[in-house]
Amino acid sequence: MQCSLRKISDNMKIKYNLLKEEKNTNARLGTIETNYGTYDTPMFMPVGTQATVKTLSPEEVKDLGAGIILSNTYHLWLRPGEDIVDKAGGLHKFMNWDGPILTDSGGFQVFSLSKPKWISEEGVKFKSHLNGEELLLTPEKSIEIQNKLDSDIAMSFDECIGFPHTRKYVEESVERTLRWAKRGKDVFNNPRQSLFGIVQGAEYEDLRKHCVEELVKIGFDGYSIGGTAVGEPKDVQYQQVEYSCKYLPKDKVRYLMGVGDPIDIIENVIRGVDIFDCVAPTRLARHGHAHTKYGKINVKNNKYKDDFTPIDETCDCYACKHYTKAYIRHLIVADETFGQRLLSIHNIRFLIKLTEDLREAIKNDNILEYREKFIKDYYGDKDYLQNKTTGQGE
RNA sequence: GGAGGGUUAGCGAAGUGGUCAAACGCGGCAGACUGUAAAUCUGUUCCUUCGGGUUCCAUGGUCCGAAUCCAUGACCCUCCA
């Protein structure tokens, strides 16, 4: 049977190739080889939690220059169920995406579905957000689901803890996350899928180091940095990333989970991160906000009602090439989905373009200058750290 | 011509003697959002020099006190002729 999806290779673990380290920082230029082609890093992955990047077609996502996209175990487990996706021929066929897919493990839902949840050694009991049914997600179950979904990269089931927390809790949580990582790896059985371990340990360097060392002993195809963008101050986030990257093996890809503020991407690329994902560009878009070279704007604002210029004159995306702020504002205010699509296209493109620029800066060994210029344009005189916390807090 | 019902903030709509500058919804204006329980959530929305000022169709009245009671007028709706 002729498969409509172009699978480049059938039986391959992902492979990271480190091409260059930036002269003045820890930033890295590389490529990641997947079953669906080879992509450059640093890279930004658009998020398609429920097997769709909200409001966009796969063709549109492709056109933005996206490589890997992210989907979610928890959501697909609840609906439509991994067996349906399996029956469809796997997630790629199910959603008509012929690029690589990474599935998150459900670990973030341990954090975000905060109210009724019980964490035990066995796993996490949730109440389904759909019908209140009590569900038990375990490391084994998460991997089983992901094996069936047949994504290219599966994530270990971890505990993503919020901020702040006690050192004692972090210590216990890291050990549990490590045991869960081992249990997940033990049942992992999809030969064409890769498995990533997740570094936790909050803001404690020794715990991050310990977590990395233990994960490396277990052995994974790539490593993620978790537990960031959960309400901590920005400088704490950057430190957490530093403490993780410092000990991670150079020959494996590094994925910082859930981070997608432009400045955070730059700061963390500088600290050695290769891959990012974030819901922000699409969520902000649906809420009427757009990134521009000169900062984030709220397109709904009255002052744009007769502004017939593009969102960002310097942007090469479809929305900026063909539509004005006034028109997009009208669509958003009128609650038309096309407005949400246009802003989603723009915001994702903005972040992907950012990673393209960062790759160029790494090549040219001028990423610090790039950062300075970016901040000057994007934040103006504002202090971009300004005691701001990241993410949703607890 | 006769009989009822109605008129409250930008709109819709509660309120029928004091705790009413007036619930609630919409609309408006702003804000938040970082591995998506999020096309969601929050604030604000008569004027103000923040002391206060002026409101509930209009005018006059009752009362210590009126969006609320009475009188007259204006306009709107329904039914009967």
Image (spheres, rainbow, N blue to C red):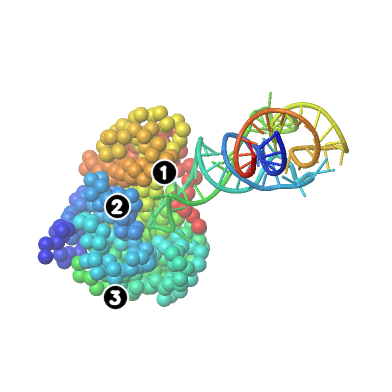
At x 31%, y 64%, the residue is A155
Relative to B55, is A390 above or below? below
Residue A2: give x, y in percent of width and height: 11, 62
Q: State the CA–CA distance, disc 2 to disc 3.
A: 27 Å
What's the chain of the residue with tag 1? A
Relative to A58, is B28 above or below? above
**Left or right, A300 with reference to A20:** right
Residue A150: give x, y in percent of width and height: 25, 66
Total labels drawn: 3
Element carrying mark 1: loop
- Looking at the picture, which amino acid does disc 2 mark? Met
**Left or right, A77 with reference to B21:** left
Of A174 and B78, which appears nearest the observer?
B78
What residue sits right under mark 2 in the picture? A45
Q: Which of the two labelled residues, at mark 1 and mark 3, occupies the earlier sequence position?
A: 3
Of A117 and A166, which appears nearest the observer?
A117
Query: Can residue A224 be seen?
Result: no
The quarter of the displayed image where residue A72 is located? bottom left
What's the chain of the residue with tag 2? A
- Looking at the picture, which amino acid does disc 1 mark? Asp
What's the chain of the residue with tag 3? A
What residue sits right under mark 1 in the picture? A335
At x 15%, y 64%, the residue is A10
Residue A81: give x, y in percent of width and height: 33, 68
What residue sits right under mark 3 in the picture? A187
Element carrying mark 3: helix
Q: Which of the two labelled residues, at mark 2 and mark 3, occupies the earlier sequence position?
A: 2
The quarter of the displayed image where residue B22 is located? top right
- Looking at the picture, which amino acid does disc 3 mark? Val
**Left or right, A208 with reference to B61:** left
Element carrying mark 2: strand
What is the crowding at mark 2: few (fewer than 14 residues within 10 Å), some, or many (at least 20)?
Answer: many
